[in-house]
Amino acid sequence: MVLFDIDKTLLIGSHCHFYSFKQAFKDLYGENITLDIPNLQGMTDKQIIYQIAKKNGIRISDFENIRERIVDHYIKNVKREKIKPLRGTREILDLLEDMRIPKGIVTGNIEDIAWIKLKKARFNDYFGFGAFGDEGCQRSALLRLALKRAEKIYNKINPKESIIVGDTPRDIKAGKKVGTITVGVATGDFTIKELKAAGADHVFKSLEDKEKFIRIIQKNMITCEYS
């Protein structure tokens, strides 16, 4: 089992996501909110929404309402997005397909937005399940949820034989907490050194190194025999 983050792990070029947050808050609360939240990278959208609300003195009584409004604004502006796959990602996904290793998503994105981004990058056909940023405030909880969902499809899943791939320390720390193998990719805002410091078992400059990825799978004896 290999689980991937989305933004700056599989793809880049999403610029309307947080614009949609701003528009949704303005619609519902009449506030021109700011996004100057420190250490934002790797937070879930649900966590960000509540952080924004707290910072701006707003009480959210209906999370589903703000979630839906954010999705609506994202859909209205999605044509402005310049989403494209990061180099090497499609080759890695094809490799996992050939090896019959299941793949899933663990992302901070609201689910609707996550699938839209994957579709624009032409990655949606590689994935059938995941855990998403409107389902919790902690990435470790999302990772556990994704593994639980995987078990319903592929039977017993061993976290120790599962990989989480992400570009932020939060991805890595979630994997360490749950007990998965952690792979950091320095294709986002964090360096190889920072991802190693977060505790990553393996760190890539990018996912272009297929051979190294295969070695990680082989070393950890990740089974390819799923029913």
Image (cartoon, grey):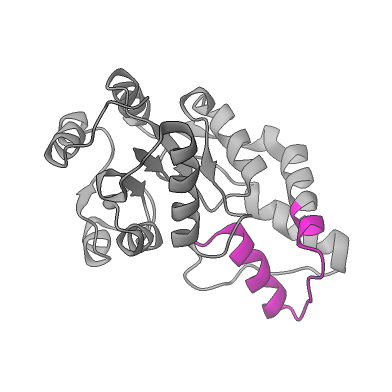
The rendered magenta stretch, by its main secondary structure, is classed as helix
Q: Quadrant of the C terminus?
A: top left
Residue at image coords 41%, 32%: 154
Q: Is residue 140 above or below residue 223?
A: below
Judged left or right of residue 95, residue 109 is right
Judged left or right of residue 134, residue 84 is left
Residue at image coords 34%, 64%: 177
Quarter where residue 104 is shown: top left
Residue at image coords 20%, 36%: 217
The reply to whether residue 82 is in sight is no
Q: Is residue 225 above or below residue 54?
A: above
Q: Position of residue 23 (x, y in %)?
A: 78, 56
Judged left or right of residue 58, residue 193 is left
Q: Is residue 199 above or below residue 54?
A: above
Q: Which residues are magenta?
A: 43-67
Does residue 211 show up magenta in the picture? no
Q: How many marks?
A: 0
Q: Position of residue 24 (x, y in %)?
A: 79, 57
Q: Pick the residue in front: 79 or 29.
A: 29
